[in-house]
């Protein structure tokens, strides 16, 4: 059995794209099991920069099978344009290389309109969503009014569901959100066209994956977002609308819990967050600016500048526990070069109390003051290092301290954006 789950352990954008891309070399099948096109992976292969929002990053390796499993919410328009762009560059020319679950839910135009309008109405209290309709789509899934691929492909069913939903959504859009309503015909025609283009990829992916596991095929399950954006375990309500922890793979891909061999957590050597919500180690001044500039910390999906701060060991230790991590892939260590001293958050304080875990209360988390320990930095560039021994001694000490504080072995270190700029331990 060779099944690996990869998840982000902070607030997303940990550099999963590059790590998944490297791990995909040794996989036969790469699976997305949650989220939607709120995610975005920027991959640098040679001079080519590719941003993927839905199709697993493994697509850049010829002959691999990419699966969009049932837990993913899919905007078919985005999927079609991603497919078209990839094909124009010589990828995904074989239809058999992409499989979409017939049970995956569709993001509809009214979901996007509702997402955006609600954020506008929330004003200052907005969540800072990506505006891609993710939340409203998962709401409909749970309300049992969602539309799945299997429904899209059944002529009568799609018409019936769309009519019923649109009637209700238009009342909500017009009366509550003060937005214009939407026309049935335009949505119907566009989605039928998308359905016709995507039909050939749609199947029972849970069955396909089980057969793959039984046959000993190597499968990589690629998580989206990060643990602190998990709807149950993250910094609620400033989270996404799905479960992002490793356990979500069972429901999101339809695979039993005994089927997984290892769980790799992707973790940045510092911390970033896009959107609103508490962020104890955030640096709003020159240090944050320095991290943003050196780390090119701008959202792959929305282009928003990411909020930046020091490594938060409280948060990562918690994420390691929630995900059952067997190892950490530490990314962007090179961004810290030239910063001295480096700070690591080892606990929080608020109201005379010390916290060794992330408090559930938003109010408390917003008020906590991080406790830091300092470590000396390094000035030698790291991008040429291919073994741990080639790192400057202070970089090695920093990595060792993170391992200790998070109680998790660091098994990979990324020292640059290129595939080769990686240390495998
Ligand atoms: P939504 O997922 O668009 O509903 O956004 C909810 C929150 O999750 C917002 O703070 C987003 O910025 C954040 N978010 C969603 N997807 C990602 C991601 O892939 N990386 C980082 N943040 C994300």
Image (tube, grey):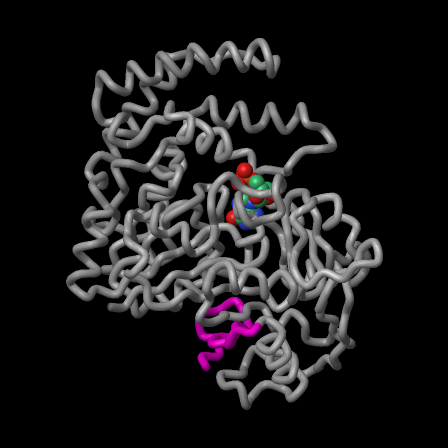
Residues drawn in magenta: 407-425
Image-quadrant location for residue 384: bottom right
Quarter assignment of residue 260: bottom left
Residue lying at 45% horizontally and 24% vertically, measured from the top left: 109
Let me know if residue 301 appears in the view. Answer: no
> What residue appears at the point 73 percent right and 59 percent down from the top-left corner?
281
* Count of numbered circles in the view: 0
Splitting the image into four quadrants, where does ligand 1 fall?
A: top right
Q: Is residue 162 above or below residue 278?
A: above
Residue at the outermost right position? 352
160 lies above or below 74: above
- Is 424 part of what is drawn in magenta? yes
Q: Position of residue 99 (x, y in %)?
A: 25, 46
> In screen coordinates, is 135 left or right of 33?
right
Q: Position of residue 58 (x, y in %)?
A: 34, 58
Q: Residue at the front extreme?
A: 353
Q: Where is residue 376? Give x, y as percent.
A: 75, 81
Judge whether residue 172 is colored magenta: no
Indicate left or right for 155 with 60 as reference: left
Is residue 405 found left or right of 145 in the rendered image? right
The answer to whether residue 284 is seen in the rendering is yes
- From what the image shows, is residue 188 above or below residue 234? above
Q: Nearer the viewer, residue 387 or 119?
A: 119
Q: Quadrant of the N terminus?
A: bottom left
The x, y position of residue 35, in whole percent, is 44, 43
Quarter occupied by residue 369 = bottom right
């Amino acid at each position: 059995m060779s099944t690996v789950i990869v998840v982000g352990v902070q607030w997303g954008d940990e550099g999963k794209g590059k790590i998944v891309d490297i791990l995909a070399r040794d996989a036969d099948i790469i699976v997305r099991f949650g989220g939607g096109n709120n995610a975005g992976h920027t991959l640098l292969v040679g001079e080519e920069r590719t941003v993927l929002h839905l199709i697993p990053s493994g697509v850049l390796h010829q002959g691999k099978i990419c699966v969009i499993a049932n837990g993913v919410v899919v905007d078919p328009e985005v999927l079609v344009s991603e497919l078209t762009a990839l094909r124009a560059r010589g990828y995904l020319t074989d239809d058999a290389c992409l499989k979409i679950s017939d049970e995956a839910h569709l993001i509809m135009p009214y979901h996007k309109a509702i997402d955006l309008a609600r954020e506008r109405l929330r004003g200052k209290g907005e969540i800072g969503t990506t505006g891609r309709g993710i939340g409203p789509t998962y709401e409909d899934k749970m309300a049992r009014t969602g539309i799945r691929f299997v429904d899209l492909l059944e002529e009568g069913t799609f018409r019936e569901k769309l009519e019923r939903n649109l009637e209700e959504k238009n009342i909500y859009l017009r009366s509550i959100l003060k937005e214009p309503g939407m026309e049935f015909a335009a949505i119907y025609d566009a989605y039928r066209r998308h359905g016709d283009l995507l039909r050939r990829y749609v199947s029972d992916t849970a069955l396909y994956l089980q057969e793959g596991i039984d046959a000993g095929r190597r499968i990589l399950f690629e998580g989206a977002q990060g643990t602190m954006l998990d709807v149950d375990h993250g910094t609620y309500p400033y989270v996404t609308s799905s479960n992002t922890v490793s356990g979500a793979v069972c429901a999101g891909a339809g695979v039993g819990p005994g089927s997984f061999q290892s769980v790799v957590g992707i973790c940045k050597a510092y911390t970033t967050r896009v959107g609103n919500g508490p962020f104890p180690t955030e640096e709003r001044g020159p240090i944050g600016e320095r991290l943003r500039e050196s780390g090119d910390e701008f959202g792959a999906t929305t282009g928003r500048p990411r909020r930046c701060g020091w490594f938060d060991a409280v948060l990562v230790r918690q994420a390691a526990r929630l995900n059952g991590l067997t190892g950490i892939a530490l990314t962007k260590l090179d961004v810290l070069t030239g910063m001295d001293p480096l700070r690591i958050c080892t606990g929080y304080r608020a109201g005379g109390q010390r916290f060794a875990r992330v408090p559930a209360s938003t109010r408390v988390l917003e008020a906590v003051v991080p406790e830091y320990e300092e470590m000396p930095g390094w000035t030698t560039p790291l991008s040429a290092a291919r073994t741990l021994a080639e790192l400057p001694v202070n970089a090695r000490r920093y990595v060792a301290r993170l391992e200790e504080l998070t109680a998790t072995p660091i098994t990979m270190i990324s020292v640059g954006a290129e595939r080769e700029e990686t240390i495998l331990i």
